[in-house]
Structure formats: structure tokens, C-alpha cells
């Protein structure tokens, strides 16, 4: 009985893990979580990248927005 | 088994007895004979005397006046079906070894199939039958290759398990042989769970005059000589060396789970199961084999799925660019006592035609140096920025056995699933590469003033434009330039002049950045496979431990 119970725990658990890992694989879940920023203007950054790096980037990275 | 014989051997020796009900010649108590004509000895349930049925009377053979003290879990006369054959319990022999271990052997009988022995030891049960066909090796030892070898039985190899002397402690019921207490024989056991084979032999010890002694008689002789301080040690040793095999019985058995015995005989109580049975199948082995099969199946399924997903994923390199830091924009900065260079460069663009992840691989050629960076992925249509940070460092020192190193020149990371779109890449970071050279260049060529701050502001969204039209002052507020750039306290930046002629003399570092899109995320699958392997290792260790306990 104990063996059967263990098997009943072992089988669903491994199946669940299998399903979970397959789901993550198919959906490309996971990966590194990024910091996000909104309304960035690529045109302006291209025009003066050094300014973006030295002035706006620290604000964005500190969470204060651009 | 004590002097096991099957019914074919027992019949000719039994005295003709027809009656079933008798009186004990010692105490006068009623004694019932279950198998008249087969049994050669029966024990009185009242005075424990051993009686011999002869011509419809019981003859007193060994006189006792004591109560039977051993419990019979299967009562006399109880019937039960094992292997589809109905057996009746007609007797029990209690035996013990030299280490004090005791076990019970229940004698079962079926008129068509003969006798079986159901052995109970520490709550473990084995159904045994005699097997006269098994013999001895060329040197007269039991088994095909001797006590330390293996024997073949029905295509199975049985390993030698143990060897011991067994002595009859008590008997209950009736037996098809001349049973008596104290009877002794040597037992050799072989196992291959759930099967066992045992060989029981009796030796006679012969002196120079041809007189035979049993093992017990020889022991008594030695004890007497010891007590009398008689100098007969050499003579007794000589007798002990000269032994002859006078009797041997082979039997084979199979382990039975207590539940089966309990159900077969309808028993309400059973002895407590202690430890492992001698030929009990390793319960951990079954679980290990199950886990092995189960893990193999899931391992296969995972591998196949990984292959399909990996094959389906595009894994296309969308950016493979080698950048020299001396072609990037640099700014010399000081924070506390640390000088470093901030840099930025634009490696290019990544186009994602569908929602997918991106895998970045970064390689450098650091030597006692560090570099930290932020990779900006900015969606050109929506202005949404995704910023991933990372760092590389490579330090080493010492020599010979004391040499050490830490860090790596490579790193990679996988982004989460990104929305489809065209992404502009911007990399900015800091490093200590070329700080000294940069300072020299600054002294020689002067410095450039800070670059004008251009707002990295997106055009007004339609909603914001609408709000600007409807709310007085909102338009002016929305279009107003952002606040002036204020450098972080304690930080000062110095740029080389625009016309700086020798950028090539500034920091030198190769930084390779590769980006692949739609990469199969097999990390979870790998984790799952490792979990499976962990399960397997756990069950294997348990299996080996149980084997060791046996």
C-alpha cells in the first residue's frame, strides 16, 4: 500500500514536472528579466548617444524615468 | 528441516495404523492422529511426551512432563490453499542455531502432493519442499561448487548465503519421521530471492575402532574429558577429523509475503515482521527498477521533445559584430578613488518577426580588467526599452601550484520572450581598460566640453497630443525641454576633444557581441532531466543500502 501510494505521488509529480518543463520549452518561458523604460526616442539617441549614456541612462537605470 | 523425507520414503517405514483417536501412554490424555499410517511420531499435547504409533497403539518413546511453550501461529488441523493446493497443518518443529536465533517450520500435508514446510522466521515466511535431485560436488561438499560458490537451480544461479548448525528445540503435532528433541544437523543456505535452496547434512564421527559418534556425543565426550582433566584431546581431535556423511537432504523454497499466508489460512494474528527475510525480494529493487523504467521513458520523451523544439526554433544569428572599444565614445570618470571609463556604442539592430527570445553572447579579451555593461533593446515603433545588464572580469595571479584565476572572458544571457518588432541596440557601460592611456591622452590633447544633452524623448502620442489641445498649458508643458542634465554628485566626466588624433592609442579591447533569435529554451527540460537523475540516484542508493542490510 505504501509502495502504491508512493507511486501515486511519484507518477503525477513527475508528469506534472514533465508537463511544466515542456510548456516552458514550447512557450520560450524564462529568460533574463529586463528593466524596462518607456517612450525612448531612437532618433534622438542616435543623434547624440553620448548624451543619452551620460545624462539619461543613469536616470533610467535608477528607476527615475528618462 | 529436520530429517526431511517425502511421503514416498515415509510410507514403507511407517507401522500399519488405522485408528485416529489414541490415549497417551504417559498421561492418559487423548491424542488424535491426523495421518494414521503416515506419521511415525506424534507429540502429546498435554504432557509433551513423544509417542510412536505402532499397530493401532501409541508407544512412549521420549517421556516428558511439561507444557508446550511455543506458539503456533497456524494451528494444528488448519487448512489453507497455497499455489492452488489445499494443505493441512499437521505439525511444527522449532529449531535454533548457535547464535540463539529461533524459527518455526510448519509441516503441511496434501494427500496428492505430499509434504511441504512453511518456515516462519522473524515474521518472514518461506514455502519449502524437499528436492532429493540436488546433489553434491565431486569433493562431497553440498552444492555444485561448494559452500562459497553458486548452485544452478531451474536456470537460476543461487549464491551461497550462510552455513550454520541447527538444533531441534521443540516439536508439536505429528511427523513422518522419528522426530526427537536436540537433533542436530549442519545447514548450508543458498539464495536468489525469492528462491532459496538449503542442504542439511548429518555427519557421523568415527574413532579408530570404528565406533560412530554423533556431533552431540562427540561434544559430550570432549566436555567429560575436560571435566576429568583427562588427556584425551588428541584422541578426540582425531575422531573429529574422521567424519562421514550419513544423511543429507536438499530442499528448495520460495519467499511468501505474510499477507498471502494470513489469507490462505484465515489467521487473525501474525508474528511481527522484523528486518529482512533471508530470501525476501529486495523491496527497494522493485522501486528502483520502476524508477529506472519511468525515468528512461520520461528522459526519452524529454530528449525527443527537446530535439523537436530545437529543430523548430530558428536560432538565427541576427547580429555578429566585433567592436573595438577604442572606436566607441569614452568618458573618463572618477568616483571616489576609482578612475574608470564610461563608454557607449551602437552595435546595430535586431528584427524580431514574431514574439521570441534573443540570446546574447558577449566575448572580450580582458587581462586583469573588468567591464560592466547594459544592453538596451529599444523598440523603434513603440519606444519601449528593455535593458539587460551584465559584466565580465578576468583576474589571475601567482605561479605554479599557487596560481589562481577568476572570472571569464565570455558571458551569455537569454532574454525573456520579446514582442515582435524592430529593436535598436545600444550598449553602454564602464570599464577600467585603458584608464592610464586615456589620462595621458587627456593631458596631452586636452579635453572636450560635455556634449549637449539631447532629450531622448519620444514624439507625442495621439492621446497626449489630444490632451495638450484640450488642457490649457498642457501643450507647452509636454513640448517643454526636459530638465537640464545634472551630473551625479562626486562624478566628473572628461571627453577627449573631437579632433583627438590618436583614438587608437586609447583603450584597446575587443568586444564581440552575438545575438540569436528564437532560441529553444531547454533550461527547464534540463532541470527536469537532472531531477529524474536525482530520483534515480536516490532509489539506487536505497537499493544498495537494502542489499547491504540483508
Image (spheres, coloured by chain):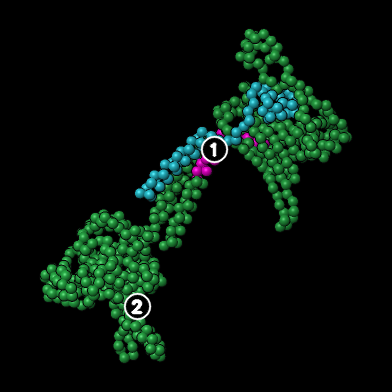
Chain colours: A cyan, B green
Q: Is residue B351 above or below residue B174?
A: above
**As drawn, is A51 to the left or to the right of B302?**
right
User: Residue sitting at 73 percent across and 17 percent down?
Assistant: B481
Q: Quadrant of residue B361?
A: top right
Q: Which residue is mark 2?
A: B140
Q: Quadrant of the C terminus of chain A?
A: top right
The residue tagged with tag 1: helix, strand or loop? loop
- Characterize the local packing of mark 1: few (<14), some (14-19) or many (20 or more) Cα atoms within 10 angstroms: many
Q: Quadrant of residue B72?
A: bottom left
Q: Is residue B266 magenta?
A: no
The residue tagged with tag 2: helix, strand or loop? loop
- Chain of the residue under label 2: B
User: Residue sitting at 47 percent across and 51 percent down?
Assistant: B536
Residue B205 appears at what percent x and percent y?
Answer: 33, 83
User: Residue sitting at 22 percent across and 76 percent down?
Assistant: B63
* Cβ atoms under marks 2 and 1 closer than 8 Å: no
- The span shown in magenta is B513-529
Q: Which residue is mark 1?
A: B521
Q: Is residue B319 above or below residue B121?
A: above
Amino acid at each position: 500500500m505504501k509502495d502504491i501510494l508512493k507511486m501515486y505521488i511519484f507518477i503525477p509529480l513527475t508528469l506534472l514536472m514533465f508537463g511544466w518543463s515542456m510548456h516552458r520549452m514550447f512557450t520560450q518561458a524564462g529568460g533574463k528579466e529586463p528593466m524596462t523604460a518607456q517612450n525612448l526616442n531612437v532618433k534622438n539617441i542616435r543623434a547624440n548617444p553620448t548624451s543619452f549614456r551620460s545624462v539619461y541612462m543613469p536616470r533610467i537605470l535608477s528607476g527615475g524615468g528618462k | 528441516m529436520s530429517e526431511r523425507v517425502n511421503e514416498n520414503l515415509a510410507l514403507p517405514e511407517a507401522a500399519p495404523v488405522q485408528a485416529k483417536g489414541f490415549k497417551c501412554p504417559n498421561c492418559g490424555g487423548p491424542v488424535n492422529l491426523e495421518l494414521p499410517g503416515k506419521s511415525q511420531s506424534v507429540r502429546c499435547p498435554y504432557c509433551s511426551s513423544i509417542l510412536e504409533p505402532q499397530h493401532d497403539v501409541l508407544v512412549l518413546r521420549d517421556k516428558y512432563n511439561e507444557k508446550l511453550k511455543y506458539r503456533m501461529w497456524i494451528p494444528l488441523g488448519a487448512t489453507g490453499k497455497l499455489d492452488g493446493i489445499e494443505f493441512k497443518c499437521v505439525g511444527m518443529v522449532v529449531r535454533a542455531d548457535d547464535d540463539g536465533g529461533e524459527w518455526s517450520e510448519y509441516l503441511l500435508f496434501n494427500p496428492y502432493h505430499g509434504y511441504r514446510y512453511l518456515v516462519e522466521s522473524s515474521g518472514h515466511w518461506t514455502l519449502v519442499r524437499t528436492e532429493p535431485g540436488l546433489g553434491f560436488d565431486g569433493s562431497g561438499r553440498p552444492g555444485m561448487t561448494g559452500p562459497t560458490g553458486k548452485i544452478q537451480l531451474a536456470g537460476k544461479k543461487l549464491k551461497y548465503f550462510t552455513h550454520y548448525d541447527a538444533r531441534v528445540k521443540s516439536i508439536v503435532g505429528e511427523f513422518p519421521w522419528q522426530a526427537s528433541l536436540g537433533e542436530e544437523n549442519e545447514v548450508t543456505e543458498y539464495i536468489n530471492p525469492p528462491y532459496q535452496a538449503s542442504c542439511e547434512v548429518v555427519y557421523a564421527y568415527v574413532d579408530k575402532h570404528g565406533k560412530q559418534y554423533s556431533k552431540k556425543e562427540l561434544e559430550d565426550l570432549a566436555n567429560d574429558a575436560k571435566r576429568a582433566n583427562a588427556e584425551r584431546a588428541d584422541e578426540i581431535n582425531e575422531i573429529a577429523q574422521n567424519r562421514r556423511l550419513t544423511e543429507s537432504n536438499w530442499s528448495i523454497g520460495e519467499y511468501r509475503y505474510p499477507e498471502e499466508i494470513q489469507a490462505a489460512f484465515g489467521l487473525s494474528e501474525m508474528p511481527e515482521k522484523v528486518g529482512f527475510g533471508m530470501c525476501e525480494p529486495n523491496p527497494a529493487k522493485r522501486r528502483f527498477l520502476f524508477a529506472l523504467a519511468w525515468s528512461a521513458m520520461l528522459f526519452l520523451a524529454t530528449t525527443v521533445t527537446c530535439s523537436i523544439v530545437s529543430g523548430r526554433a530558428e536560432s538565427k544569428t541576427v547580429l555578429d559584430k566585433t567592436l573595438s572599444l577604442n572606436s566607441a565614445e569614452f568618458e573618463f570618470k572618477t568616483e571616489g578613488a576609482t578612475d574608470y571609463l564610461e563608454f557607449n556604442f551602437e552595435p546595430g539592430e535586431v528584427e524580431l518577426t514574431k514574439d521570441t527570445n534573443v540570446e546574447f553572447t558577449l566575448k572580450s579579451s580582458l587581462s586583469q580588467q573588468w567591464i560592466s555593461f547594459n544592453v538596451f533593446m529599444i523598440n523603434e515603433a513603440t519606444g519601449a526599452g528593455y535593458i539587460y545588464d551584465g559584466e565580465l572580469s578576468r583576474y589571475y595571479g601567482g605561479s605554479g601550484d599557487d596560481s589562481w584565476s577568476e572570472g571569464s572572458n565570455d558571458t551569455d544571457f537569454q532574454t525573456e520572450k520579446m514582442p515582435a518588432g524592430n529593436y535598436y541596440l545600444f550598449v553602454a557601460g564602464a570599464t577600467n581598460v585603458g584608464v592610464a592611456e586615456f589620462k595621458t591622452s587627456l593631458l596631452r590633447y586636452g579635453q572636450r566640453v560635455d556634449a549637449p544633452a539631447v532629450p531622448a524623448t519620444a514624439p507625442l502620442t495621439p492621446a497626449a497630443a489630444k490632451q495638450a489641445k484640450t488642457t490649457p498649458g498642457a501643450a507647452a508643458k509636454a513640448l517643454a525641454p526636459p530638465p537640464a542634465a545634472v551630473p551625479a554628485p562626486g562624478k566628473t566626466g572628461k571627453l577627449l576633444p573631437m579632433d583627438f588624433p590618436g583614438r587608437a592609442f586609447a583603450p584597446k579591447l575587443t568586444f564581440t557581441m552575438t545575438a540569436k533569435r528564437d532560441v529553444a529554451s531547454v533550461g527547464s527540460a534540463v532541470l527536469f532531466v537532472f531531477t529524474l537523475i536525482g530520483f534515480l540516484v536516490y532509489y539506487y542508493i536505497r537499493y544498495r543500502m537494502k542489499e547491504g542490510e540483508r
